[in-house]
Every structure is written in C-alpha cells, then in structure tokens.
Image (tube, rainbow, N blue to C red):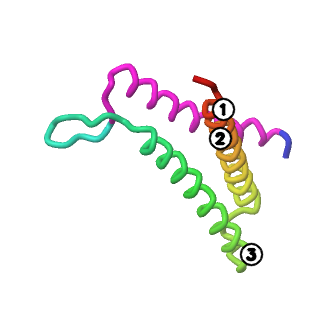
C-alpha cells in the first residue's frame, strides 16, 4: 500500500499545480477563462475558490459512491481502486482544509495590522 501513496499524492499535486497554472496564466494576462460576446472576463478569487471546492466535492462524492457501491455488493469495482479513490478524496479534503486555515490566518493577521 505504501507504493500507492506517491501515485495518490501525485494526483492531488497535479490538480493543485493545474489550478496554480490557471491562476498564473489568468494573472499574467489579466483575463479569465469565461468569454461573453468574444470578450474574456477577469478571473475572480471567488470563481477560482468555487472551482477548487467543486473539484474536492466531486472527488469526495465519487469516492463515497464507489465505497457505497462496493459495500452494497458490487464487486465489479476492485477494492484497491475503491481504497485509492477514498485516499485521493481524503488528501484533497485535507489540502482544502489546510488552505482554508492558511487563508483564515492570513486574513486575521491583515485585520490585526495597524494602519
């Protein structure tokens, strides 16, 4: 099971790197990915955060669905893939919680600054 950890962590890491590259490209061009009438809209922090939360939510939903299906007796799905999907969802959720904690800490430190 230990050799699977780099593979699972690599998947989460690639998702994070994908989000980072989207943010970097949007910041460097000043444009987002949405287009209205041929004009690209700016990417907002809220949209980026919602996209990241939706990705975590879909991973958790997929993993819990696979676990429930396996528990209900559908053994067409191998137990190893169920466990890997559960671990991916767990890592994604832990990463989201860590990011939330850091953003909250940064916000509170900014609010405590004297002007």
Residue bearing mark 2: 104
Badge 2: residue crowd in 10 Å (few <14, some 14–19, many ≥20): few
Disc 2 versus disc 1: nearer the observer: 1
The magenta stretch spans residue 64: no
Mark 3, secondary structure of its residue: helix
Compute the Cα span from label 2 to label 1. 12 Å
Label 3 CA crowd tier, 10 Å (few <14, some 14–19, many 20+) = few
Query: Answer yes or no: do the residues labelled 2 and 3 have beta carbons within 8 Å?
Result: no
Q: Where residue 107 sits: x, y (%)?
A: 61, 36
Range covered by the magenta-colored residues:
3-32
Looking at marks 2 and 1 on the same chain, the residue that comes earlier in the sequence is marked by 2
Describe the element under mark 2 as helix, strand or loop.
Answer: helix
- Residue located 65% across and 45% down the image: 96
Image point 72% across, 52% down: which residue?
Answer: 90
Tell me the SS state at disc 1: loop
Is residue 82 or residue 78 the one in the foreground?
A: 82
Q: Is residue 2 left or right of residue 32?
A: right
For residue 112, the mark is: 1
Q: Residues within 10 Å of mark 1 (few under 14, many from 20)?
A: few
Picture quadrant of residue 17? top right
In terms of secondary structure, what is the magenta stretch mainly? helix
**Which quadrant of the rendered structure holds the C terminus?**
top right
Position of residue 2 measured from the top left corner of the image (x, y, whole percent): 85, 41
Q: Is residue 40 left or right of residue 18?
A: left
């Amino acid at each position: 099971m230990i050799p699977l950890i780099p593979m699972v962590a690599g998947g989460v890491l690639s998702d994070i790197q994908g989000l980072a590259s989207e943010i970097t490209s949007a910041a460097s061009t000043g444009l987002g990915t949405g287009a209205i009438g041929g004009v690209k809209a700016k990417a907002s922090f809220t949209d980026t955060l919602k996209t990241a939360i939706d990705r975590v939510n879909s991973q958790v939903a997929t993993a819990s669905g696979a676990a429930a299906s396996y528990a209900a007796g559908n053994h067409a799905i191998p137990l190893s893939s169920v466990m890997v999907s559960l671990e991916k969802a767990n890592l994604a959720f832990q990463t989201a919680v860590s990011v939330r904690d850091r953003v909250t800490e940064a916000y509170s430190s900014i609010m405590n600054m004297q002007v």
